[in-house]
Image: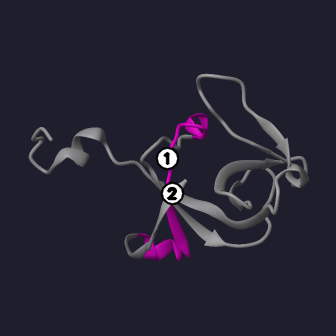
Amino acid sequence: MSERRTASALAYLHPDFCFIMNDDSMECAGIRAGDIVAFTACDHAEDSQIVAVQTDSAVLLLRQICNGELLADAPRNRREHVIRFDELSGAKIIGKAVEVRHIFEWAKKGTDNEEE
């Protein structure tokens, strides 16, 4: 994920931060590249919740499974990648997803469907 954003448009959910998803690794969870994902800050989550995990080198969006011992992505074009939480260097949960906003491709080009 990249590009931290404020979340004033999502105020009724009281998110603490947002990220723009930069790949399709969570596509089967309904989150695609370019989507805005809003999070509430926390350091733990329940199984099957989607969490933001801060590592030494990146922030990852993953689904928590097996009492928090394992994390998994949800791609459509390959098998899911499952990793042990303790195998991610410096890993800590920084938030859980509360909303996803999908921006349609044509809307990114302009309000009148004009070409870039």
Residue 103 position within the rendered picture, expressed as x and y whole percent measured from the top left: 34, 48
Q: Say left or right for 45 vs 25.
A: right
Residue position for label 2: 2
Q: Amino acid at mark 2?
A: Ser
Foreground of the two, 18 or 1: 1
- Disc on the earlier residue, 2 or 1: 2
In reply to whether residue 24 is colored magenta, the answer given is yes
Foreground of the two, 102 or 24: 24
Q: Quadrant of the C terminus?
A: top left
Residue at horizontal 59 percent and vertical 34 percent from the top: 28
Q: Say left or right for 8 vs 88.
A: left
Residue 22 got which mark? Answer: 1
Residue at horizontal 69 percent and vertical 48 percent from the top: 62
Q: Is residue 76 above or below residue 5?
A: above
Residue 43 lies in quadrant: bottom right
The outermost residue toward the front is 57
For mark 1, give the secondary structure.
Answer: loop
Residue at horizontal 69 percent and vertical 40 percent from the top: 73
Foreground of the two, 50 or 82: 82
Q: Is residue 87 above or below residue 114?
A: below
Q: Residues within 10 Å of mark 1 (few under 14, many from 20)?
A: some
- CB contact under 8 Å: marks 2 and 1: yes
Residue 32 position within the rendered picture, expressed as x and y whole percent measured from the top left: 49, 41
In reply to whether residue 90 is colored magenta, the answer given is no
Q: Say left or right for 36 vs 95.
A: left
Residue at horizontal 25 percent and vertical 47 percent from the top: 108
Q: Amino acid at mark 1?
A: Asn
In the image, the segment drawn in magenta is 10-29
Residue at mark 2 to residue at mark 1: CA–CA distance:
6 Å
Residue 93 got which mark? Answer: none
For mark 2, give the secondary structure.
Answer: strand
